[in-house]
Image (spheres, helix red, strand yellow):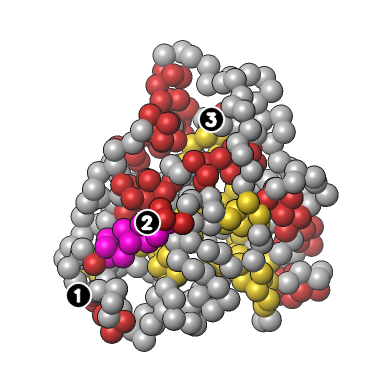
Amino acid sequence: MSTTTTTTITSLPAPAPSPTPNTTTKGQNRMLLDGQPTNYGDFRDDLNRDGYAVIKGAIPLDRAKSYADAFYTYMEDFKLGYTRTNPQTVRRGQLPVMNEKGMILDYGVTHEQWVWDIRGEEGVVDAFARVYDDEDLIVSFDVVNVGFANREDMPENKPWPHQDQDPSKPGFRCLQGLINLNPNGPHDGGLIVCKGGHALSSQFHHEMAHEERIPAWTPEWYGYTSAGMDWLASHGLKWEKVCAGPGDLIVWDSRTPHYNVAPTGEVDRLAVYACFMPVREVGRGELVRKRDAYERRLGTTHWPNAKHVSKSNIAMRDGKPCPVARERPVEEPVLSERVFRLTGIPYLEEMERGKEV
């Protein structure tokens, strides 16, 4: 499979004036992401056309570097032998448990203070607010990802092209995102997307409905078979490696075919996933489930409405609980009022008091 490399240079303009909460105009200009020409004059034009976009400098460079340092420190502080200055310590037994894609799923990492600080960055939240035309958002309790440049002892990261949306529920439903913390060029691993695939998603699933699906743990995941990949290619779609700098935010429509690749160069890939959606699109029961996940410091995958919640934070190593397993983060999150609203809990409390959200 041939790929090309692209860097979308789009900056986030100054935030628009905040809309009045609970007005009937909220969300009227929510993006459709139908691939039709738009004229926003910012990253939203790229997102609508290509199914993804890079927002340059969503987090200032100095803070992005401090977050990268916090990420490395987090892994070193497990005291399993890993140190960032010695590539020979990149060994599975010297690192926290992660899957072959580089995701650290357990240990309460989704609620570490530094992870919450990244989610709450104004430039990150504002980008999603622009897409949804709504500032009353909730955020996913999603995981972090490290792709080590030295992979001698790491499992192979095989291609896994997929979309994170149930084909039976078409249209734009979820905007996924990740915050990049290290320089991420053509050889530094990371996100690869099928440019423009979101706009042909309905056509693809209609024409390929006869094909047996790859088994998945949730209907909100659809894997592309070799026949599916041939269909994408036959319709002129090409795969592109997305490049980004420290502090850049990458967003993509969940219908856009994508996966991640391992580094082949000398720079580690560091990323934190964060997805947002309007609270007005979330039911009370979902907010109750989300509150429980927050209080127990559990993850929710990329769905902010807590469609899926982890059962535990205990990492398993070789079939047994990891010797340094833990149920809660090392540094419990202390959130500002603004960031705490992203948990959904204040909105739920307003519902419970009978106030419209």
Question: Position of 128 compared to 146: left or right?
Answer: right
Please tell me in which quadrant of the rendered image residue 285 appears: top left
Residue at image x 52%, y 34%? 137
Residue at image x 40%, y 75%? 148
User: How far from the left and from the top, in percent, is residue 51?
Assistant: 69, 56
Please tell me in which quadrant of the rendered image residue 29 appears: top right
Q: Is residue 73 rendered magenta in the image?
A: yes
Looking at the image, residue 116 lies above or below residue 288: below
| 340 or 317, nearer to the observer | 340
User: How far from the left and from the top, in percent, is residue 247?
Assistant: 49, 56
Q: What range is drawn magenta here?
A: 64-75
Looking at the image, residue 103 lies above or below residue 25: below
Amino acid type, residue under disc 1 in the picture: Gly
Sequence order check: which comes first, mark 3 or mark 2? 2
SS class, disc 2: helix
Question: Do we see residue 328 in this rendering?
Answer: no
SS class, disc 3: loop
Label 1, on which residue?
81
Residue at image x 21%, y 55%? 326
Sequence order check: which comes first, mark 1 or mark 2? 2
Amino acid type, residue under disc 2 in the picture: Tyr
In space, the residues marked 1 and 2 are separated at their CA atoms by: 21 Å
- Locate the N terminus by quadrant: bottom right
Looking at the image, residue 66 lies above or below residue 281: below
Label 3, on which residue?
136
Residue 67: give its label: 2
SS class, disc 1: loop
| 192 or 214, nearer to the observer | 192
Which class describes the residues within 10 Å of circle 3: few (<14), some (14-19), or many (20+)? Answer: many
In space, the residues marked 1 and 3 are separated at their CA atoms by: 43 Å
